[in-house]
Structure formats: C-alpha cells, structure tokens
Image (cartoon, helix red, strand yellow):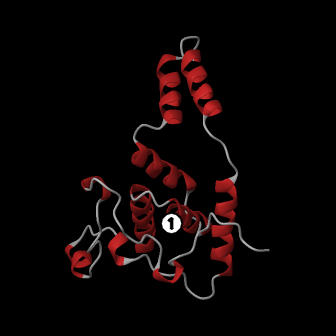
Amino acid sequence: GEEHYNCISALHKSMRGSDENASLYWLARMLEGGEDPLYVARRLVRFASEDIAVAAYQGCHFIGMPECEVILAQCVVYFARAPKSIEVYRAYGNVKECLRMHKGPLPPVPLHLRNAPTRLMKNLGYGKGYKYNPMYKEPVEQDYLPEELKGTDFFKERET
C-alpha cells in the first residue's frame, strides 16, 4: 500500500541526507517486510545514476567480448582497491534485530520524509518541512529515523 512508497521515499531522502544509519534502517524495513529486492535495486540505480557495476554490465552488453574485457578489468580493480569492512554486515544485522524485537506496529514514516504526489497528501502534511539537501551548501540538520528510534546507532556494537 501507501507505506511501500513512504518507505522508499524515506530511503532516498536518508541517503541524500548522508544518514547511513537511517538509510540502512529503511532498507532493512523494506526487505524484511517482503519488498522485492529488484525494486529496491532499481531505485538505488536511479538514485546513484553513475553506478559502476551497472555501467560495466551495460558496457559489456553493448560491446561484447573481447573488447569488454577491459571494462570488466577496470570494474574489478576499482572494487578490489575500494576500502572493505564488515561494518555494514554487522549494522544491517543490528537493524534486522531491531525490527524483529519491535513490539507492536512499526513506527510510521515521518511526515516530512513522505512523498506527496497528490493535493490530499500535501494537505495532510506529507513532505512538509523536508529540506532537499542538494539545495544547501552544508549538510542540513534533519531527522531521518522515526521519532521512537531517534538516537539509535545501528553501527555501534550491540551488547550480547
């Protein structure tokens, strides 16, 4: 239903706002809720616009072998040289645990993170007060997690 669009809107806005913690939360909320991962992947490609792996795939599709081998080589070297960590694996596990342990209905997507494609939604306050980060020189102060999760950091080690 509508929450499908609210969650993807919150994911986009959290990534745009450079809030890795909230970005991971909205991703897990969608995937753990049964969202089609290909839908999420398409939205991520749309968000990134210059995704290296997608560009390599498309280049190989258009050119074919043997010419595309250099495209794949560049992609592999880029990924090999990129910093690596298991931090995201652990943080995503923390988000999944948070979702599983939550009592009652999951908190609603904050109104300012919701998309407002209709007049009714605008009148209900969807998107009101949202600060579109690319319009500012500096990162803006804005909450991206639901109110009851404010201050939660999924990247910190959880106590066992």
In the rendered structure, the answer to whether residue 28 lies left or right of residue 113 reads: right
* In the rendered image, the vertical position of residue 81 relative to residue 7, given as above or below: above
**Residue at point 67%, 76% (across, down):** 100
Identify the residue at the far bottom of this view.
104
Pointer 1: what residue? 22
> Furthest-right residue in view?
160
Q: Residue furthest top?
A: 66
Quadrant of res 97: bottom right
Q: Dot 1 surroundings within 10 Å: few (below 14), some, or many (20 or more)?
A: many
* Residue found at x 48% / y 28%: 58
Nearer to the camera, 121 or 52: 52
Say which residue appears at 53% left-offset and 30% top-offset.
57
For the point 44% across and 51% down, which residue is it?
Answer: 43
Give the image location of residue 92, x and y in percent: 64, 62
In the depicted structure, whether residue 64 falls above or below residue 151: above
Identified by mark 1, the residue type is Ala
82, 105: nearer the viewer: 82
- Image coordinates for residue 35, horizontal then vertical, percent: 55, 63
* Quarter of the image with the C terminus in it: bottom right
Left or right position of 6 against 137: right
Compared to residue 63, the image places residue 81 above or below, namely: below
Q: Quadrant of residue 131?
A: bottom left
Q: Quadrant of the N terminus?
A: bottom left
Q: Name the element at disc 1.
A: helix
